[in-house]
Image: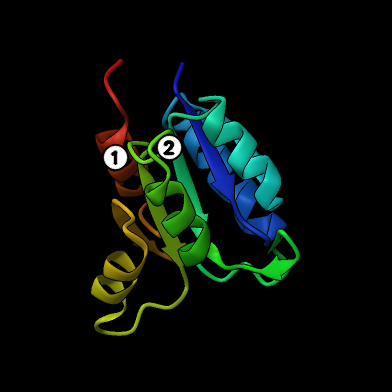
């Protein structure tokens, strides 16, 4: 079973995503907003894909505040985790945000909140899952 790591600081969003992914997608789910845990899970290959909230208001890494863009940049810059698919999830859905966030972060895809079409949400995630 494939595992999705949800990096999200809003517990309600995390629960909603988790329920959609387990019920509709048949996927296992892990959730954390702790950046050290994200790095550990990514390095241990404990997730097949990461759903990354862009604006993590409380996340800190090595003493500095970081957001989902920065965490994605760190994961994509590390040869050990660079191939791990990352989908940014954000409520910032202004025109141009998608391209801007993807270019800035190096993420593989982008989903805007709120998630209305649950099947499309699952399909978008499953499409990026590695086939191994």
Residue sitting nearer the eye, 117 or 13: 13
Disc 2 crowd rating (10 Å Cα; few below 14, some 14-19, many 20+) is: some
Mark 1 to mark 2 CA distance (whole Å): 23 Å
> Which badge, 1 or 2, is on the more N-terminal residue?
2
Observer able to see residue 97? yes
- The local secondary structure at tag 2 comes to loop
- The local secondary structure at tag 1 comes to helix
Question: Is 83 left or right of 67, judged from the image as shown?
Answer: left
- Residue at x-position 41% and y-position 58%: 88
- Residue at x-position 67% and y-position 60%: 9
> Residue 93, image x and y in percent?
36, 77
Query: Label for residue 81?
Result: 2
Question: Is 59 left or right of 108, judged from the image as shown?
Answer: right
Observer able to see residue 114? no
> Residue 49, image x and y in percent?
42, 36
> Residue 37, image x and y in percent?
68, 41
- Residue at x-position 69% and y-position 63%: 59
Quadrant that contains the C terminus: top left
Look at mark 1 in the image and give the residue it sits on. 123
């Amino acid at each position: 079973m494939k595992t999705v790591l949800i990096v999200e600081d809003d517990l309600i969003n995390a629960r909603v995503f988790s329920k959609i992914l387990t019920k509709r997608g048949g996927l296992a789910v892990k959730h954390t907003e702790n950046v050290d845990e994200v790095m550990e899970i990514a390095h241990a290959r404990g997730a097949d894909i990461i759903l990354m909230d862009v604006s993590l208001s409380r996340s800190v890494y090595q003493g500095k505040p970081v957001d989902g863009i920065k965490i994605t940049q760190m994961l994509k810059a590390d040869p050990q985790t660079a191939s791990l698919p990352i989908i940014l999830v954000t409520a910032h859905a202004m025109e141009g945000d998608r391209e801007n966030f993807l270019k800035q972060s190096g993420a593989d895809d982008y989903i805007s909140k709120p998630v209305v079409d649950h099947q499309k949400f699952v399909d978008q995630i499953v499409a990026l899952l590695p086939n191994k």
